[in-house]
Image (spheres, helix red, strand yellow):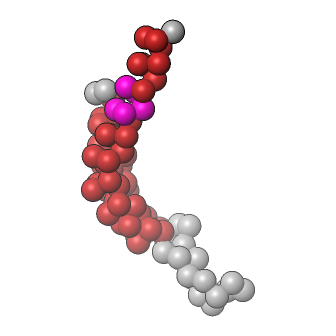
Amino acid sequence: MLLYPTGITSEVGLIYIALPYIRNSEKYCVRMPNKWNFSFDYYYGALLTLGIYVPGSPHMYNYMLGQRKKVLSRSKKD
């Protein structure tokens, strides 16, 4: 149960630390004009991920605890 919050914290920290590199390198960015008429900036994608990840972490943790409880209670019945 301790490893899940540690993993979430490390993932968020690594994305945060990588933000300056992502912005400067423009790796995995798709610029217009191109044949798909689509533009994607990986930097803003990473910021969006952080924006969803941080407030969604308690929900993910509670879901994981519920799944753990369900699996452990099933093994006690057997």
Q: Between 55 and 37, which is closer to the camera in this rendering? A: 55
Q: How many marks?
A: 0
Q: Residue at x 48, y 74 (%)?
A: 41
Left or right of 37, for residue 28: left
Q: Residue furthest front?
A: 77
Which residue occupies 37% across, 33% down?
A: 66
Residue 74: x %, y % from top left = 47, 18
| Residue 39, above or below 43 | below
Residue at (37, 25) in percent of width and height: 69
- Asked if residue 28 can be seen in this view, the reply is yes
The residue sitting at 59% across, 87% down in the picture is 32
Q: Nearer the viewer, residue 43 or 71?
A: 71
Q: Quadrant of residue 16?
A: bottom left
Give the image location of residue 4, x and y in percent: 34, 34
| Residue positioned most to the right | 35
Classify 76 as above or below 48: above
The quarter of the picture where the N terminus appears is top left
Left or right: 8 in relation to 76? left
Query: Along the line of sight, which residue is nearer the eye, 77 or 21?
Result: 77
Residue range corresponding to the magenta coloring: 65-69
Q: Main secondary structure of the magenta part?
A: helix
Tell me residue 39's x, y (percent): 56, 82
